[in-house]
Amino acid sequence: MAQDRITMPSGMGGIVRYFDEYKSSIEFKPGHVMVMCGTVIVLMFFLYAYGNRLLGLA
């Protein structure tokens, strides 16, 4: 039963290539990401508390 196995050859021998020279046109500093996360959290709390009244659902 063990002789029925078929093994596939590995394409690159486990080597993964990453290209370091790629530069994105959009870059964020860590401080900006923290401010955006805080803003989203405050907005979610505000909408949770007052969203029904503002949207006319209550």
Image: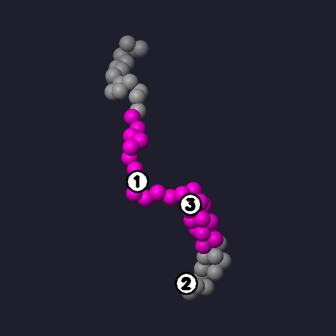
Disc 3: which residue: 33
At 37% from the left and 18% from the top, the residue drawn is: 5
37 w.r.t. 1: above or below: below
Q: Disc 1 residue type?
A: Ser
Whether residue 40 is in magenta: the answer is yes
> Residue 19, percent across and down?
39, 40
Does dot 2 land on a helix, a strand or a loop? helix
At 41% from the left and 14% from the top, the residue drawn is: 2
Does dot 3 land on a helix, a strand or a loop? helix
Discs 2/1, front: 1
Q: CA distance from mark 2 to mark 1?
A: 38 Å
Decide which of 13, 50 is in the foreground and name it. Answer: 13
Q: Earlier in the sequence, mark 3 or mark 1?
A: 1
Q: Disc 2 residue type?
A: Leu
1 w.r.t. 40: above or below: above
Q: Which residues are magenta?
A: 17-43
Determine which of the numbered discs, if any, sits on residue 55 in the image: 2
Q: CA distance from mark 3 to mark 1?
A: 16 Å
